[in-house]
Image (cartoon, rainbow, N blue to C red):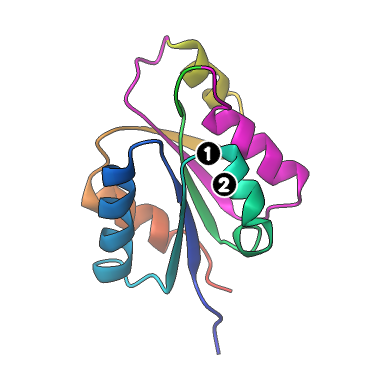
């Protein structure tokens, strides 16, 4: 029997977090979606988050705050085994977006993400 499929979704836009969570649960049939809007919120939920199979991270989490790249580095440092996808509404020339493109074994996607693309990421992750 396959285990629970859990996804981390991180963005500083609370409305977007709610929409993505509902979409993932309702249309993508994800068992659990953990949301966070900051690195500290991720760290507070460390045990649950490190068990996620997929992390969808906003690149820019606000001025003078750790970025999605910082979160990805924290995840990998803490032995996160899941797939990481970055979402961004910024130009590819933005320094944070450029930094995200250099994080190994990740994908960077422009916002807004389409349902088909979201489903593709979910279906491309092995359930454990």
Q: Is residue 59 visible?
A: yes
Question: Label 1 vs label 2: CA separation?
Answer: 5 Å
Residue at image mark 2: 41
| Secondary structure of residue under mark 2 | helix
Q: Quadrant of residue 90?
A: top left
Q: Residues within 10 Å of mark 1 (few under 14, many from 20)?
A: some
Residue at the image position 23 percent from the left and 52 percent from the top: 115
Left or right side of 101 for 22:
left
- Percent across and percent down for residue 117 are 29, 48
Residue at image mark 1: 38
| 40 vs 98, nearest the viewer | 40
Q: Residues within 10 Å of mark 2 (few under 14, many from 20)?
A: few
| Secondary structure of residue under mark 1 | loop
Question: Where 114 sits versus 119, above or below?
Answer: above
Q: Are marks 1 and 2 in contact (CB under 8 Å)?
A: yes
Left or right side of 50 for 11:
left
Q: Which residues are magenta?
A: 64-93
Is 39 included in the stretch rendered in magenta?
A: no
Is 85 included in the stretch rendered in magenta?
A: yes
């Amino acid at each position: 029997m396959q285990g629970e499929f859990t996804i981390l979704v991180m963005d500083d836009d609370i409305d977007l977090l709610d929409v993505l969570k509902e979409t993932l649960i309702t249309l993508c049939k994800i068992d659990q979606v953990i949301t966070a809007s900051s690195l500290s919120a991720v760290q507070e939920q460390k045990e649950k988050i490190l068990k996620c199979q997929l992390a969808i991270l906003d690149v820019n989490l606000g001025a003078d705050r750790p970025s999605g790249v910082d979160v990805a580095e924290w995840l990998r440092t803490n032995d996160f085994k899941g797939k990481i996808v970055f979402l961004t509404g910024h130009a590819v020339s933005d320094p944070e977006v450029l930094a995200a493109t250099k994080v190994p074994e990740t994908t960077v996607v422009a916002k807004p993400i389409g349902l088909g693309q979201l489903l593709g990421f979910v279906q491309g992750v092995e359930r454990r």
